[in-house]
Amino acid sequence: MLTYIDAMLAASDEFMCHRKGIPSDQGYHNFLILSGRHEANGLRVVSNKRGQGVVHTIGALNGGDVPMSELGPLDTKWKIRDSVKGYITNVDGTMSPVVHQWDRWASEMSRWLDSAFVRDNFIPGERELFDRPPSFVEYDPATCTDMPWKSAHRSSCAGLRAEHHDWVSSPPERRPAKEACCKFGGGIKTG
């Protein structure tokens, strides 16, 4: 790794593109790979086309160098985001293992990321990804009883907020809060 970094710094000192106002980090990477300098330094570096390797870099698709006529959504324009599950795909349609510079698409990706990584016990494909938290429903405690419900963060329905409606209880039940808790319209109804 230090050999790679030393080569990057040497290329930066040699060409000084950054002093000319040229975004240059990717250019240095490309130059070192294509010129054979990495091989000369004893490094084996593999470069894949976008969407064909382990790391899928998507930032430049929304960059300042892309003409306005070429900009568009990841799913319909670039066809690299699964429109249902939200994840970024490689050109062969498989899920990209690593997505670099996803933050350039934060507004488009945030709904999926919030669902996938912020919620408790999320399991892809077991529920809708883009649902919005409902408000609590009014119920009569005399005619509705919460089912047993416990997760790593809460021990009952009582402590759940509206945005927790899609949390799932810990095994073995794996019961969605919206089915177990009266405040979400679930629970056991009597009378």
Image (spheres, rainbow, N blue to C red):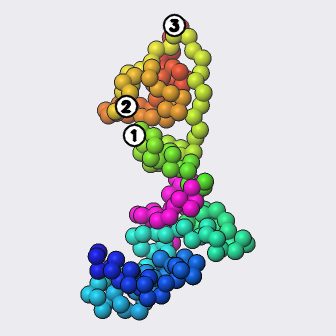
Q: How far apart are marks 2 and 3 (CA)?
A: 27 Å
Mark 3 vs mark 1, foreground winner is 1
The residue at which mark 2 appears reads as: 153
Looking at the image, which residue is at 49% across and 35% down?
A: 166
In this picture, which residue range is highlighted in magenta?
81-106
At label 3, counting other C-alpha atoms closer than 10 Å, the crowd grade (few under 14, some 14-19, many 20 or more) is: few
* N-terminal-most mark, 2 or 3: 3
Q: In the rendered structure, which amino acid carries the disc numbered 3?
A: Ala
Q: How far apart are marks 3 and 1 (CA)?
A: 30 Å
Q: In the rendered structure, which amino acid carries the disc numbered 2?
A: His
The residue at which mark 3 appears reads as: 142
Dot 3 falls on a residue whose secondary structure is loop
Is 82 in the magenta? yes
Dot 1 falls on a residue whose secondary structure is loop
> Quick check: can you spot residue 93?
no
Rendering coords of residue 137 (x, y %): 59, 21
* N-terminal-most mark, 3 or 1: 1
Rendering coords of residue 80 (x, y %): 55, 66
Tell me: residue 145, above or below residue 8.
above
Looking at the image, which residue is at 50% across and 57% down?
A: 87
Residue 121 marker: 1
State the image quarter where residue 54 is shown: bottom left
